[in-house]
Image (tube, rainbow, N blue to C red):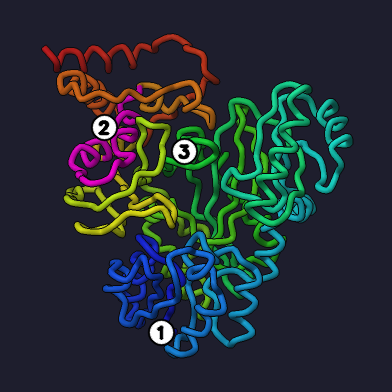
């Protein structure tokens, strides 16, 4: 086993990896910029090294500096976390050339899946279903003609992109040319490549992803699905496992396809194959993330498998200890990304000093945080400051626990997304599992400080829990945005909730 690992990241994910290493008896090395001299990951690691100014381009994205530190500190391996250099094939190759193990997939697999068009072509050969679309590299005139054939609405996507950058949804032919120009400009600025392509928009789709693990000996398994449909501008805000839209048969089929996609690039380590799932349970390959995901804790909670520790063991050449038939999903987990953003002001970044902090605790609650009282929150890095995860025997209990934890969470000094998440938990359509990737475009979560109103909503959720208690799960039907009437059991649940209020 490795003796010392360098964590090429910061914030809550650096702490997450440090703790996993400590539980394996592995020494840790932190790196930090000027802005992070007093950061928690610096304090918790066994060693810490300064790597540059606050700007990520001069510190956390300087792979040469990070490898130099690893060699100086005598680190056996580097874990990149997510973001920064996590999906940088050149960095993974540089680690290999320097004799330092990169805890993640091979440079070749990162490159194959990093380019969306190459990824589509690769997985298509393995029989993975694709969304109708165009190849990359077409001219604007060719894309205009292709859009007519595919049919509107279409999605303009950057070939080298991710995170919603270089992406535009187009509903009318007259808007496509300007959208192509805007997407190309954004892609060039973000990725240094203005290549774009088109995909058919799958309307009413859910974003469902499959977690995979693969070792160096050809063993590949999946750990079930995560639902990531609650998004704002293609950025995930809430994730849960399992998904209300996936039954055992669909899970097995999606899992088999995800494993096939991973095998198509000889994948090693943890990875995520993302799909769009339509209203008729057809699913289509979206992309593969060749790294640890922000939402990995929900899978860990329902499977009992520590994904970070598995990544470390795989990178050390060990075989997977888990067989596919050993993987079971028990209970329900939901994660809320806590960001330093103002939900009342279009989620604009919020900066300042954290003057008070109280993190929630209690049964089924997990907090992964990188902040502390006195910490300055600036604009240099991603606004996510913590992950709040709730686990329950079923979805209703997980919602209730997450809701309770959100009411306990106190962060003073900066605006956060906590009020948004609390409002989302109180939204009936979210409670019933009736949403898709465009849910937040048409449903604004309530933001209210009215305690009586919140008590009423909590009572109705309690009624849901009463109904679910003693049952394995409830299958929630996604109705594509239409009210389909109130079933007898829902009426009974609502009546029970109302009875509790009087």
Residue at the image position 69 percent from the left and 53 percent from the top: 160
Residue at the image position 49 percent from the left and 35 percent from the top: 232
**Bounds of the magenta segment:** 402-427
Identify whether 281 is placed above or below 453.
below
Mark nearest the camera among 1 and 3 is: 1
Q: Position of residue 271 (x, y in %)?
A: 56, 59
Point out which mark residue 243 bears: 3
Residue 416 magenta: yes
Identify whether 474 is placed above or below 72.
above
Q: Where is mark 2, residue-wise?
A: 469
Residue at the image position 67 percent from the left and 58 percent from the top: 114
Residue 499 magenta: no
Say left or right for 268 vs 59: right
Residue at the image position 39 percent from the left and 27 percent from the top: 430
Say left or right for 327 vs 152: left
Is residue 440 or residue 429 the one in the foreground? 440
Q: Position of residue 242 (x, y in %)?
A: 44, 42
Decide if residue 333 is in sight here.
no
Q: Quadrant of the C terminus?
A: top left
- Mark 2 is surrounded, within 10 Å at the Cα level, by few (under 14), some (14 to 19) or many (20 or more) other residues, namely some
Say left or right for 302 vs 481: left
Check contact, mark 1 vs mark 3: CB within 8 A. no
Mark nearest the camera among 2 and 3 is: 3
Which comes before the other along the chain, label 2 or label 3? 3
Determine the secondary structure under disc 1. Answer: strand
Mark nearest the camera among 2 and 1 is: 1
Check contact, mark 2 vs mark 1: CB within 8 A. no
Determine the secondary structure under disc 2. Answer: loop
């Amino acid at each position: 086993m490795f003796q010392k690992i360098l964590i090429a990241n910061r914030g809550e994910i650096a702490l997450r990896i440090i703790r996993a290493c400590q539980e394996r008896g592995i020494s840790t090395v932190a790196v930090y910029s000027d802005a992070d001299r007093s950061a928690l990951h610096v304090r918790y690691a066994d060693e810490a090294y300064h790597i540059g100014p606050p700007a990520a381009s001069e510190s956390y994205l300087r792979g040469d500096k990070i490898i130099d530190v690893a060699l100086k500190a005598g680190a056996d391996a580097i874990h990149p976390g997510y973001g920064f250099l996590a999906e940088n094939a050149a960095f993974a190759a540089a680690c290999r050339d320097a004799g330092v193990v990169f805890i993640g997939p091979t440079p070749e697999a990162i490159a194959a899946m990093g380019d969306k068009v190459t990824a589509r072509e690769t997985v298509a050969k393995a029989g993975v279903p694709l969304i109708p679309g165009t190849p990359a590299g077409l001219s604007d005139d060719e894309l205009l003609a292709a859009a007519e054939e595919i049919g509107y609405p279409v999605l303009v996507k950057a070939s080298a992109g991710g995170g919603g950058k270089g992406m535009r949804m187009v509903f009318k032919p007259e808007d496509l040319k300007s959208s192509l120009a805007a997407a190309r400009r954004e892609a060039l600025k973000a990725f240094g490549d203005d290549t774009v392509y088109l995909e058919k928009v799958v309307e009413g789709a859910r974003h469902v992803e499959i977690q995979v693990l693969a070792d160096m000996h050809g063993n590949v398994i999946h750990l079930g699905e995560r639902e990531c449909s609650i998004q704002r501008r293609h950025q995930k805000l809430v994730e849960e496992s399992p998904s209300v839209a996936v039954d055992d048969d669909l899970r097995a089929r999606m899992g088999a396809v995800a494993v096939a996609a991973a095998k198509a690039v000889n994948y090693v380590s943890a990875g995520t194959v993302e799909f769009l799932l339509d209203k008729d349970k057809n699913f289509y390959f979206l992309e593969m993330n060749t790294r640890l995901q922000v939402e990995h804790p929900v899978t860990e909670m329902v499977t009992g498998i520590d994904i970070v520790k598995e990544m470390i063991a795989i990178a050390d050449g060990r075989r997977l200890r888990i067989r596919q038939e050993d993987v079971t999903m028990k209970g329900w987990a939901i994660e809320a990304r806590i960001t330093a953003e103002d939900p009342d002001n279009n989620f604009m970044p919020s900066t300042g000093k954290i003057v008070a902090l109280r993190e929630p605790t209690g049964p089924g609650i997990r907090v992964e945080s990188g902040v502390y009282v006195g910490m300055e929150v600036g604009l240099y890095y991603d606004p996510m400051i913590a992950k709040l995860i709730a686990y329950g025997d079923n979805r209703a209990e997980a919602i209730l626990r997450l809701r309770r934890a959100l009411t306990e969470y106190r962060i003073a000094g900066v605006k956060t997304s906590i009020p948004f998440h609390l409002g989302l938990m109180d939204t009936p359509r979210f409670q019933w599992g009736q949403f898709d990737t465009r849910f937040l475009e048409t449903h604004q979560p309530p933001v209210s400080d009215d305690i009586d109103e919140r008590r009423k909503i909590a009572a109705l959720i309690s009624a849901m829990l009463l109904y679910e208690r003693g049952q394995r799960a409830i299958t929630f039907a996604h109705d594509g945005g239409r009210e389909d009437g109130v079933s007898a059991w829902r009426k009974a649940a609502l009546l029970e909730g109302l009875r509790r209020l009087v």
